[in-house]
Image (cartoon, rainbow, N blue to C red):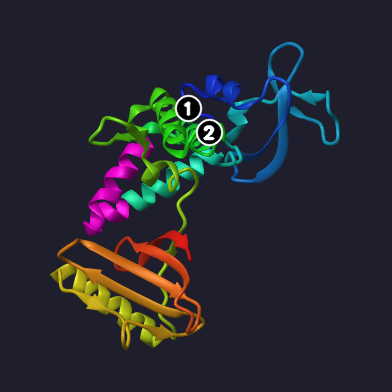
Amino acid sequence: MILETTNPDFMNILSAQVPKYGKVKVKLVDNDGITTSHRLGWSSGGYVMVMHERRKRYGFYVTWSSFKCIIFPEKKATENDKWVRSWTNVLNRLEKSGLWEEVASDVRTALDVGLDKIKQAYNIDNEYDNSIDYTENNNRQAIKIQAIDARLVGSREDGTLYTDTSIVWYMNKEAKVKKMHFGKKWLNDKELEDIANALENKLPIQVGTDGRITGGYDVSYNYQPEDNKAWYREEYRGMGNGHYYLALDATHALFYEDD
């Protein structure tokens, strides 16, 4: 964050950025444009001061108008920040491409519910009571999860509840999104261009001979416009199992499961 000393709310913002019982490393830019590194802390009199080098308790006051601005370090992203950012990226790509409408709906719900509640629900869904049967165990889990947020459960025709695994199982951590890759650059560019054209014109496409291109993996992609869905796969060569993704658009895919 860059805090200009001309900001009318400068002192309030400065006070909020300096921890009450610690120091913060900053860069001070003077009016000649010269940048120097310092630490800021609080004096016993309740003023923000510049700390002396290698001193924990002693510093000196400055005239802030002699500086152009203070550059504060970017705060490290929290687990929740990273989670929100990753799933927002997924949602933005899906909304633009129009693929996987049900997944986009689930992502909207997940972002609205929040990571904390989803993790609570995931932990409950992994608790098993061996003294009762499988069906009763699942029903009890779903009732507990419903109390956290009703959007994390569904209801069967007989009225019993079940955990919405599409959110609880698959969205309790950051989304893993990667760019699809089909081998050498000239081939990769061609395949991505063909995929983009197919999506734009809603034409079915299956990438590669018999749906596969052999590289480090047997890589395949297919798009079904009638279902509005597309898949990307990286399978171990000649094995038929590997890593499976939901294609989000013409270039990127969301990891779904390993087989």
Q: Position of residue 174 (x, y in %)?
A: 49, 48
Circle 2: residue type: Leu
Looking at the image, which residue sits at the far right?
54
List x then y, in percent, for residue 104. 28, 48
Q: Are marks 1 and 2 in contact (CB under 8 Å)?
A: yes
* Residue 75 magenta: no
Picture residue at 61% right of the left edge, 40% below the top? 73
The part of the image, by quadrant, that contains residue 84 is top left
Seen from the viewer's position, the closer of residues 144 and 131 is 131
Q: Specify the label residue 91 is tagged with.
A: none
**Dot 2 lies on which element?**
strand
Residue at (58, 39) in percent of width and height: 75
Q: Secondary structure at mark 1?
A: loop
Residue for point 47% across, 73% down: 241
Give the dominant element type of the magenta stretch: helix, strand or loop: helix
Picture coordinates of residue 69, whole percent (x, y): 56, 36
Name the residue rendered at 77%, 29% in the picture.
51
Looking at numbered disc 1 in the image, what kind of residue is underneath it? Asn
Rendered image: mark on residue 3: 2
The reply to whether the magenta stretch includes residue 102 is yes
Q: In front here: 60 or 93?
A: 93
Q: What residue sits right under mark 1 in the picture?
A: 7
Q: Is residue 50 left or right of residue 213?
A: right
**Which stretch is magenta?**
92-111
Residue 72 sits above or below residue 223 on the image: above
**Mark 2 neighbour class, 10 Å CA radius: few under 14, some 14 to 19, many 20 or more:** some
**Does residue 87 sit above or below 38 in this rendering?**
below
Q: Is residue 83 shown left or right of residue 94?
A: right
